[in-house]
Amino acid sequence: MAPKLGLVGGGVMGTAILSRLLAQQIYRPDEVLVSEPRATQRAELEAEYGVLTTESTPLAAEAEVLLLAIKPQIFGVIAQQLMRQAGQFSEQLVLSILAGTPLSHLETGFAAQPIVRAMPNTPATVGAGCTAIAPNAYVKPYHLAQARRIFEAVGQVVEVPESMMDAVTGLSGSGPAYVALMVEALADGGVRAGLPRAIAQQLALQTVRGTAELLAQTGQHPAVLKDQVTSPGGTTIAGVAALEQAGFRSALIEAVRAASLRSQELGKL
Ligand SMILES: NC(=O)c1ccc[n+]([C@@H]2O[C@H](COP(=O)([O-])OP(=O)(O)OC[C@H]3O[C@@H](n4cnc5c(N)ncnc54)[C@H](OP(=O)(O)O)[C@@H]3O)[C@@H](O)[C@H]2O)c1
């Protein structure tokens, strides 16, 4: 019997999604078949998650839902291995997390099939990701609901037209690096002001996490929160003024823009 979920590529992101899908009982281990070339990785997946594994991509690719989590440059090989007739798997939903791989390219391997292109980010590995999804013309509402359910296992999901995927890449795809830099820089600031490194690191991290949580829970506009914590002639407005002088906001805007443009360029190669 065909597996319910076929995962092609049991690497970092594939495993992160798999572990959450199982933990949330969206699939049972015996409903999943993972195709993965490395024997050691297959053994680990079997031992840790109890899923079935195979070396054969075509076997996993017979599943009701096929999740592609291989490196983008492997896609051509996979498409060739599968060599499908147009419409042969017209009921199967294909999900791809391959960065920078457009639906038009995916359709060369999965002609006339419902395909959802998705762009998760690294926090997905701890269930706090955000994934943008873009469907092709064959995707029906129930496919989209299925895709949402799968990616909601690793965090939040937004649906966008495919034309926005480069912008998504520049913001949430690359964003974890910007935030990591910010946490590091905040901690450096604490050390410069006299704090021990470990305490500075803890305070920096929890300040970023706590502020994000506060904004998410209250739904407050960030400017409102900033105004609330800046008292006249106080410490915070002195810090904010220093950030403005250094072009902090423009730097972030430009970072998102530069990463989006780079994503566009890479998509054309
Ligand atoms: N990591 C992220 O934050 C992130 C975010 C968004 C999107 N993505 C996308 O997610 C995809 C996977 O990234 P990753 O970081 O998880 O990479 P990864 O850890 O290298 O995982 C890819 C896995 O696919 C396996 N593989 C290679 N050829 C295969 C084949 N023919 N059949 C089945 N499996 C095969 C690889 O095995 P070997 O190691 O033996 O080659 C590896 O285990 C990429 O397309 C990436 O663009 C990643």
Image (cartoon, rainbow, N blue to C red):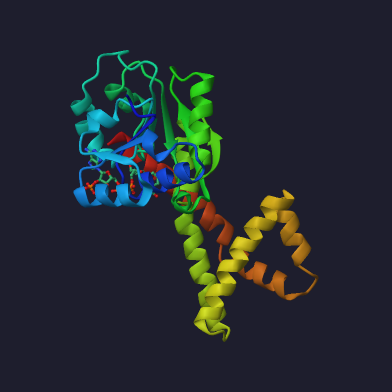
Q: Is residue 220 something that shows in the picture?
A: no
Q: Quadrant of the C terminus?
A: top left
Specify whether 88 is left or right of 144. left
Please state the quadrant of the image where ligand 1 appears. Answer: top left
Counting every numbered tag in the picture gives: 0
Q: Is residue 250 something that shows in the picture?
A: yes
Q: Nearer the viewer, residue 120 or 251?
A: 120
**Measuring 55% from the left and 71% from the top, which residue is drawn there?**
186
198 over 102 or under it: above or below: below
Q: Nearer the viewer, residue 70 or 173?
A: 70
**Measuring 36% from the left and 15% from the top, which residue is drawn there?**
90
Q: Quadrant of residue 165?
A: top left
Q: Nearer the viewer, residue 155 or 160?
A: 155
Q: Quadrant of the N terminus?
A: top left
Specify whether 9 is left or right of 126. left
Whole-percent x, y for residue 55 in the image: 20, 38
Q: Quadrant of residue 28?
A: top left
Whole-percent x, y for residue 29 in the image: 39, 40
**Measuring 30% from the left and 14% from the top, which residue is drawn there?**
88
Q: Quadrant of residue 59?
A: top left
Whole-percent x, y for residue 128 in the image: 53, 51
195 over 178 or under it: above or below: below
